Amino acid sequence: SQLGYMMLALGIGSYQAALFHLITHAYSKALLFLGSGSVIHSMEPLVGYSPDKSQNMALMGGLRKYVPITRTTFLWGTLSLCGIPPLACFWSKDEILSNSWLYSPFFGIIASFTAGLTAFYMFRIYLLTFDGYLRVHFQNYSNTKESSLYSISLWGKRIPKGVNRDFILSTTKSGVSFFSQNISKIQGNTRNRIGSFSISFGAQKTFVYPHETGNTMLFPLFILLLLTLFIG
C-alpha cells in the first residue's frame, strides 16, 4: 500500500511528495520490522526455532505484559504508518492525499480508501499480537488427543513422552527439570537445547512466558522511534 502511494504521487507529478514518503515510510517500516523481530525472538523460548510457530500471530496475544518496550515502539510505528499526526508518515501522506484530490477526485478517493485499509490491517496486527491473552498455551502441537508430557525441541518439533512414577519434578532457579531414579544409558550425542516447553504434569502446569529481548535489539528500536517521532 505504501509503494502504491509512492507510485500514485509519481503518476500525478508529485515527485517531492513521493520521495518524502519514501523516507518517512522507511523509518516507520524499519521500526515495525525490528519490532516484529523482537516479538519473534520472544516467542522462540515457547515454541522453539520454528518460523511456522514463532511467526504465527494465532499463537500470540497478550504480549504487552511481557514485552512492554517492544509493544510501545510497535504502537508508535503503527500510528505513524496509519498517518496519525504529528508522526513521520502523517506529513508525507497528507501531502500525497492533498495533491491527489487536487489532481482528480477519483485518485483522491482511491488514496483515502487505501489509507483506511492501512489503518485496518496495521491495528489488526497490533491487537492480535499484543492485546488479549497469550494463546500459545492453549494449542496442541502434537495433533494427539491426550498425552501427559510434551517437549518442544530447538527446531519446534513437539515430542510426546509418557510420564511414569520414576520421574521426580524438580524446580530450580534456572527453570524446571526432570530427574529419573533409574537413569539409563544415553545413546548418541545429546544437544543442548534452549528451554522452550510447556509441561503438563498431572493437575499442575508450568508455563514458559515470553520476555523482552536484549539491549542489542532494544537500542535500535529506541533510535528508530526517535526518528519516527521527529523526522517529519
Image (cartoon, grey):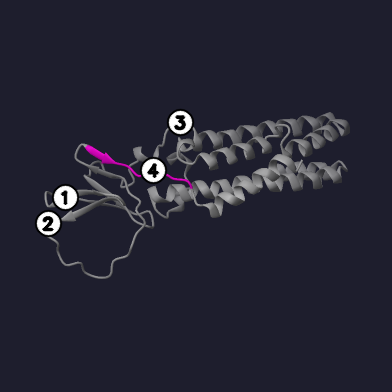
Q: Would residue 55 be counted in the magenta stretch?
A: no
Residue 185, placed above or below residue 147: below
Residue under the point 42% across and 33% down: 133
Q: Which residues are magenta?
A: 204-212
SS at mark 1? strand
Q: Residue at x 28, y 66 (%)?
A: 190
Say left or right for 99 vs 143.
right
Q: Which quadrant does the C terminus fall into?
A: top right
Instruction: Give the vertical position of 122 relative to 221 (above or below).
Output: above
Q: Which residue is mark 1?
A: 168
The answer to whether residue 210 is magenta is yes
Front residue of this view, candidates 27 and 60 = 27
Nearer to us of marks 4 and 3 is: 4
Q: How far, Cα to Cα, is label 2 from label 3?
A: 42 Å
Q: Tell which circle, 4 or 2, labels the residue nearer the N-terminal end.
A: 2
Q: Which residue is mark 4?
A: 209
Residue denoted by label 2: 181
